[in-house]
């Protein structure tokens, strides 16, 4: 599936013709855009678009920190963006070239401001929550009808995980998501920088680790949709895409997503322009294009993530705007929390802990 | 005349300098620095404009902290050991599968041999990554293998093979098999059949003749094949990360994590330096063996 899409994006960029002088290189998450939009951008602006994908913030960050990545637009998550701004990776946006920024949603701008003060370097692309995706029938089969599918209990209590192991469980391979979730589960502050407190998550994660089939940040979309696994702790939109693919395939798999009731991480993916972007002008054009309400709505309708564009909401399909798994209601919105980047010492401790947990040593 | 000779000798050394020593020097340099939030993400960086003084100041800031960190943390030793175990086991497995194939090829009618050879090389025509992905499709819970086994009635519930060490071994044996088969085949093909006839004339059974004649004479091929498999498997990253599960600990993965997840280029470089030092031992042994072989041939 991904391959086909990739090939499609590739041929799109090829067929766009060699005559166009201006080009823009965009590096975004995998399965994260409606490819029609890429073509539309080329048709409208005459700028050749080269679209490339990654599936973890780590890969993106390493490319950015190595310098001269060659990309004009990149889409890191906000907590990573914060550190990258410190490292001098990005250039401030030229607001004059972004007339469509009037469409943005103040609520989201406020929430991203702690990462990027005044939103000077970035524009929100999508935002969502991190939570639990389940194959409803298989989980009921394993745990009975009262399975706590909306609670962190499901993934952090060995009592449940033991029974789920047989049908397969995926965890995100992202300590920045899993550690805060485990902290929430044991009732600690998910934003803590204190390594002694973070250490308390080790026994919790170690206890369920034997039942985790795989730590991976994108494979669970297909695995859930195919029925290969029954539980995934992952990103909201990815799980909803899995739900959609299963529906399309009519393979009898029913997927449901829930943000854990104990509180869920709210994350933001931000479009930004690297300081050494070869073509910042075209990059601004791309950002402005994406901030067009209809374009942004098309992207959300395709990927099932909420966006930070208020004006786009009238163009959203009914099943997107009314789905509380995508656009949470006021109450849930309050229970969502944001995380910030760890200081280097804590970061080192966390990654080491994460490696230890993943390998079980 | 002398100049020509000098150039001839200089070329391999230049190659070694450009593609081994200089990159190694860069890695070693990074392994002695510290991480920082910057581009590139380590400090200090060498500022050539500051001249000699800048260079000495730079040198004084380097230290071996990252190496002592590796020694303190048992993760790295466990990963090295586990990689070593996986490499040894999969080398032996590849040998067990590869030798009979090479033996069969060498004993096949002469006109078949070229086509058999092509068949062994044929998988290389497809990208290595795609072949590993294909294994994911075969080994997964709803994959071809499980469907087949359930169809035959051998099992009722699908086996969990993907994301385990078993899958890693299958992937490695499959991928590296040609590297084992080809050198063994090369030695077996050169084997003088009259030696076997002589052994049998002198009262050896066929099995005895195999152990007394074929096995020792194929030794160089076996050793070459084993090294060709063992060395790349030790640092293998793609196969364990695609087919392996969370319990598969290999140094290639640890290296990747240090570099990408931790953004700790210095520690990642230190791991790479240690890995290289460990690899030098089998490579030197291999070289010695080759040389001894060459001398024996003369």
Image: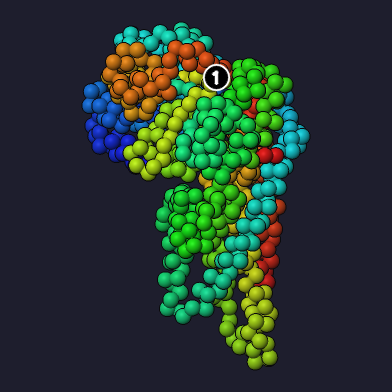
Quarter of the figure that contains the N terminus of chain B = bottom right
Parent chain of label 1: A
Quarter of the figure that contains the C terminus of chain B = bottom right
Which residue is more in the foreground, A189 or B21?
Answer: A189
In the rendered structure, the answer to whether residue A145 lies left or right of residue B73 reads left
Q: For the residue labelled by badge 1, is the local secondary structure a helix, a strand or a loop?
A: loop
Residue B172 percent location from the top left of the image: 56, 55
- The 10 Å Cα crowd at callout 1, few under 14, some 14 to 19, many 20 or more, is many
State whether residue B287 is above or below residue A92. below
Residue A86 percent location from the top left of the image: 55, 16
The answer, for residue A348, to whether it is visible in the render is no
Residue indicated by mark 1: A263
Tell me which residue sits at (51%, 16%) in the image.
A336
State whether residue B200 is above or below residue B60. below
State whether residue B213 is above or below residue B234. below
Quadrant in which residue A122 is drawn: top left
């Amino acid at each position: 599936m991904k391959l086909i899409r990739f090939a499609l994006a590739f041929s799109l960029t090829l067929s766009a013709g060699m005559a166009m002088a201006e080009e823009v290189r965009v590096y975004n998450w995998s399965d994260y855009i409606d490819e029609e939009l890429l073509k539309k951008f080329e048709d409208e602006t005459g700028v050749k678009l080269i679209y490339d994908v990654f599936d973890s913030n780590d890969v993106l960050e390493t490319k950015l920190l190595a310098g001269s990545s060659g990309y004009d637009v990149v889409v890191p998550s906000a907590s990573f963006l914060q550190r990258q701004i410190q490292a001098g990776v990005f250039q401030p946006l030229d607001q004059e070239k972004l007339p469509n920024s009037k469409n943005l949603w103040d609520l989201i701008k406020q929430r991203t401001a702690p990462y990027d003060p005044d939103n000077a370097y970035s524009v929100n692309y999508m935002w969502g929550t991190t939570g639990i995706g389940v194959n409803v029938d298989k989980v009921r089969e394993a745990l009975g009808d009262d399975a706590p599918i909306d609670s962190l209990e499901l993934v952090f209590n060995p009592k449940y995980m033991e029974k789920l192991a047989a049908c397969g469980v995926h965890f995100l391979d992202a300590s920045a998501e899993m550690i805060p979730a485990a902290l929430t589960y044991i009732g600690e502050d998910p934003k803590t920088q204190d390594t002694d407190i973070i250490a308390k998550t080790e026994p919790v994660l170690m206890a369920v680790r034997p039942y985790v089939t795989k730590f991976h940040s994108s494979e669970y979309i297909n695995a859930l949709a195919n029925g290969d696994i029954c539980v995934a702790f992952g990103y909201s939109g990815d799980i909803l895409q899995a739900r959609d693919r299963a529906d399309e395939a009519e393979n009898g798999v029913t997927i449901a997503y829930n943000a854990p009731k104990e509180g869920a991480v709210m994350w933001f993916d931000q479009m930004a322009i690297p300081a050494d972007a070869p073509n910042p002008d075209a990059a601004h054009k791309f950002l402005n294009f994406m901030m067009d309400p209809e374009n942004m709505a098309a992207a959300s309708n395709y990927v099932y993530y909420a966006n930070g564009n208020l004006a786009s909401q009238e163009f959203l399909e009914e099943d997107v705007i009314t789905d509380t798994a995508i656009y949470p209601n006021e109450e849930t919105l309050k229970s969502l929390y944001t995380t910030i980047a760890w200081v280097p010492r804590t970061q080192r401790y966390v990654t080491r802990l994460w490696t230890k947990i993943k390998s079980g040593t | 005349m002398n100049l020509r000779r000098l150039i001839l000798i200089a070329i391999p050394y230049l190659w070694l300098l450009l593609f081994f020593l200089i990159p190694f020097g860069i890695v070693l340099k990074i392994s002695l620095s510290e991480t920082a939030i910057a581009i590139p993400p380590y400090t200090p960086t060498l500022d050539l404009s500051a001249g000699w003084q800048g260079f000495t100041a730079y040198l004084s800031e380097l230290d071996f902290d990252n190496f002592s960190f590796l020694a303190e943390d048992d993760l790295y030793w466990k990963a090295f050991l586990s990689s070593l175990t996986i490499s040894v086991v999969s080398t032996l497995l590849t040998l067990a599968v590869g030798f009979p194939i090479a033996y069969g090829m060498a004993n096949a009618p002469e006109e078949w041999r070229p086509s058999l050879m092509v068949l062994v090389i044929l998988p290389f025509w497809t990208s290595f990554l795609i072949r590993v992905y294909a294994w994911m499709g075969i080994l997964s819970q709803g994959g071809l293998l499980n469907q087949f086994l359930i169809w035959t009635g051998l099992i009722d519930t699908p086996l969990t093979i993907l994301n385990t060490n078993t899958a890693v071994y299958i992937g490695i044996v499959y991928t590296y098999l040609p590297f084992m088969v080809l050198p063994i085949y090369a030695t077996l093909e050169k084997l003088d059949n009259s030696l076997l006839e002589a052994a049998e004339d002198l009262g050896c059974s066929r099995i005895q003749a195999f152990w007394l004649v074929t096995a020792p004479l194929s030794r160089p091929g076996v050793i070459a094949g084993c090294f060709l498999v063992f060395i790349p498997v030790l640092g293998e990253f793609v196969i364990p990360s695609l087919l392996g599960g969370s319990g598969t600990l290999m140094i290639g993965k640890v290296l990747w994590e240090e570099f990408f997840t931790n953004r700790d280029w210095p520690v990642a470089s230190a791991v790479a330096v240690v890995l290289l030092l460990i690899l030098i031992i089998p490579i030197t042994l291999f070289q010695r063996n080759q040389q001894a072989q060459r001398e024996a041939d003369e």
